[in-house]
Amino acid sequence: MKKVNEILEEKMLPIAAKLGSNKVLISIRDGITLSMPLIIIGSLFLIIASFPIDAWTIWLTNVGIDVYLWKGVDSSFGLMGLVASFGIANSLARQHKVDGISAGIIALSSFIVVTPFVKGESGAGIPIGYMGSKGLFVAMAIGITSALIFKWFIKHNIQIKLPDSVPPAVSRSFSALIPGVAIITLWLVIYAVFDIANIGNVHDLMLKVLGGPLGLIGNNIFGTVIAILLNSLFWFVGIHGGNVVNSILNPIWLMNSDANRLIFQADKAAHLPNIITAQFMDNFVYMGGGGATIGLVIVIAIVARRKKASQISKAMAPITLTPGIFNINEPAMFGLPVVMNISLLIPFILAPIANAVISYVAMSSGLVSTTTGIAASWTMPPIISGFLTTGGHISGSILQLVCIIIDVAIYWYFYQSVEKQNLALESKEAN
């Protein structure tokens, strides 16, 4: 055990620290997170419009309210990529100590520049699909590239500087003019080359270049298990595993979620093709947080009720169980702790992998409904979130309950070892 701990500290920790502090990964995480309120708001409209009671949905249709609810769904889910382009550039620019808002606005304009317009009698417009999840890869490329170019111009003082007496907002606007012209012109030239050569558009190219390789990991259970393993290992050495692994794979999972949502929106009885989605990972794999620690906090609560329970278990039970139910596991991660606790490494890896495999088998076999693209808040407790994310099917709640029981069983044996160590330590201190 000691050697394993030393290897993790010497080999894993430096790699995890570098990845965890990588500015590009942080910007991708922040940029995509910026659109999460819209996804949750859109999910509320989607739940109302598709609540699994026929009398309700028929009434909405007869009254004519459903049209406006679906408009709300499209106007929130459909802006995911557009918002991410701003958020990624804004985050990366701020990390480099330059104006994030100006960089974000330039990236947003560049995103629209490379997006093909559709023309009709009422004028030109942008397809919702490209502004939404299909545009995430382009949002990442444009946000990162535009922010780095913007930073280069500002750091090399290639900008219009106004006197200090000019209001800061006006001064920032003029400072962004030269880099803004260069960046938007660059993307306009790229769009023109694609258009003149008649080779499609940047969105389709990025889907093939990035979507293909990442899809090999994010779209199948074997790649998902690898992602879960890395997530747990990063968490174990004190690095937020979700911030590292999810920054890379979240675009794939969100695209899968949105593809399911569009099919579900068109036909609630249709087969939904994507099992591994953002909701699958958040609400079925990582119940309680990274490492599926809802099983651990339940075990601690059970052990703490014993007459001869350790003081550590008694103290940790109330401060870990309630947050754990709402998927907040920092009190357990750093208070128990789980981080760098070799006794809990195996269940911390096994529990989420078990959840993923069981959920995947249950959904692929048809026993449990696939997630519909409805996004429950990440703090939504299990059982409720399973019902909502599967489109109002009780099978989702039952699956979560089964996974929680298995998580408790996995953590039970290993926490008994931790409890024995705690009791031995307390007895030694008492003597």
Image: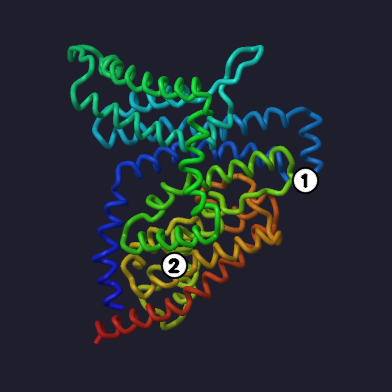
Judge whether 237 appears above or below 259 on screen: below
What residue lies at 62% left-to-right and 55% top-to-bottom? 386
Q: Residue 271 appears at what percent x and percent y?
A: 71, 49
Q: How is the image coloured?
A: rainbow
Q: Residue 188 appears at what percent x and percent y?
A: 42, 20
| Quadrant of residue 50 within the rendered picture | top right
The residue pinned by badge 2 equals 349
Quadrant where the C terminus is found in the figure:
bottom left
**Dot 2 amino acid type:** Ile
* Label 2: few (<14), some (14–19) or many (≥20) C-alpha neighbours in 10 Å: many
The residue pinned by badge 1 equals 53
Q: Nearer the viewer, residue 141 or 390?
A: 141
Image side of residue 237 versus residue 262, left or right: left
Image side of residue 256 versus residue 63, left or right: left
Q: Nearer the viewer, residue 224 or 308?
A: 224
Q: Residue furthest bottom?
A: 431
Q: Residue 407 appears at what percent x and percent y?
A: 52, 69
**For numbered disc 1, what is the local secondary structure?**
loop
- Pair 1/2: label in front: 2
**Dot 1 amino acid type:** Ile
Q: Nearer the viewer, residue 137 or 264?
A: 137
What residue lies at 24% left-to-right and 24% top-to-bottom? 153
Q: Nearer the viewer, residue 282 or 126?
A: 126
Using the image, tell me which numbered label, if any, was put on residue 261.
none
Quadrant where the N terminus is found in the figure:
bottom left
**For numbered disc 2, what is the local secondary structure?**
helix
What residue lies at 56% left-to-right and 66% top-to-bottom? 404
Judge whether 113 appears above or below 144 on screen: above
